Image: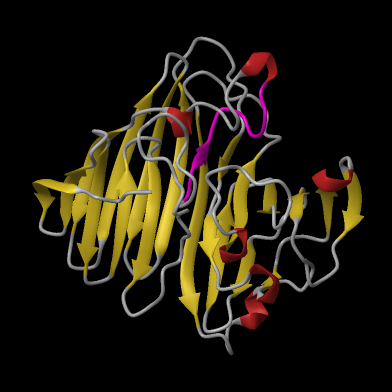
Amino acid sequence: MSLSLDPQDWLSPHCRRMVNPAGLEFIDIRHPAGEGLVSLFGGQLLQYTPAGGRPLLWLSDSAVLDGSKAIRGGIPLCWPWFGPAARGGPQHGLARLSRWRLHALCDTAQGCRLELELLRPEARLRLLITLDQGLTLELVTTNTGAGPLPFQAALHSYFAVDEVDLCAISGLGPTYRDNLAQGAECRHTAPARAPFDRVYTRPQPQTRLDRGPDSLLLEHRHQDALVLWNPHRLPLPEDIDDPRRFVCIETASLAAPPLAPGASRSLLLHCRLVDPHRETAHVSAAG
C-alpha cells in the first residue's frame, strides 16, 4: 500500500485536499483535537488518532488505493446491502465502491465536521464525520424515489489492536448468530477468541473494547445488530496482511422495514477513549 499523497488546496485552516498517484482524492485533517484521513472513494474514514492517544483504526498495509476495489480498513460503508448480494452484486453493496463528494465542512476551535454526499437514483446518502473530543460517524439515507426503499446499512469499523486474542470486548449482546457454524444461534460467552463472524441481533447500545493500554467506548444508535468479525487464520483475502492487529465491531441496521418516500433513516457510531479503570458501569455485562 502506498499512502503517498500530493497536497492540493487548503479547504479550511485544518483540512487539506490530497491526491494519490492513482488520482483518488482524500481529505487530510490535522486538528489539535485529533488527526484523520478521509477517502472520497468509498466515503471512507481511513485513519483517526485523537490528541494524545493511539490510532483507533486499522488500515491494511496491503490495501488497494487505486479505485479498483474497496479499501481494506478504516470504516467502510456497507449499503444498500450487507454481505453478498443476489445476481452477482458486489460484496457489501455499492457505497464503498462509489465516489463521494464533499458537501460541507465546518472547522472550529473544538474540532472538524465533514459532510460527504452520494446521490443515487433511488436515494441520497450523507455521511457526517465529526472529529472533536471523540469520533462520530452518522450515515443518513433519504428515500428520493417514488416507492418504498428496502436497504441494509453498516459501519464496518476496523479497530486497531495489538493482538486480537488479548482484547476484552463487552456490551455486544446476549445471543448471536454464528456464521462460522451455518448460522447457528448461540449464547454469548466471554472471552471471544478469533476467528469469529457473529451477528448479535439483540445489540447493546454501548460496547467497550479494552485494548490493554487503553479502552474504547463505542456508542451505537438506530442499530438493530452488531457484527463481530476477525478471520484469524482462516483463508485470508489478499488485502489483509495481519489479522491479529484488528477487530471489526460493526454498527448495523439489517432488519429495518423499507423506508417510505421522502423519509430518512440514520445509523450512528460514537467512539471515544476512556480510562481503562473507569466507566465500566455503563456497559452491560451481557455480551
**Position of the C terminus by quadrant:** bottom right
**Residue 258: x, y in percent?**
63, 24
Residue 24 within the segment the image draws in magenta = no
Q: Is residue 166 above or below residue 160?
A: below
Q: Is residue 286 left or right of residue 114?
A: right
The quadrant in which residue 47 appears is bottom left
The one of 194 and 48 positioned closer to us in this rendering:
194
Q: Is residue 56 left or right of residue 129?
A: right
The one of 128 and 213 positioned closer to us in this rendering:
213
Q: Is residue 111 above or below residue 83?
A: below
Dominant SS in magenta:
loop
Which residue is painted at 91% across and 45% down in the image? 184
Which residue is painted at 27% across and 34% down in the image? 22
Magenta segment range?
75-85
- Is the image coloured rainbow, by chain, by secondary structure, or in one colour? secondary structure
Q: Is residue 252 above or below residue 28?
A: above
Specify the farthest residue to the bottom: 277
Give the number of callouts: 0
**Residue 210: x, y in percent?**
61, 76
The quadrant in which residue 33 appears is bottom left
**Residue 46: x, y in percent?**
39, 52
Q: Is residue 171 left or right of residue 250?
A: right
Which residue is painted at 77% across and 74% down in the image? 285
Q: Is residue 243 above or below residue 32?
A: above
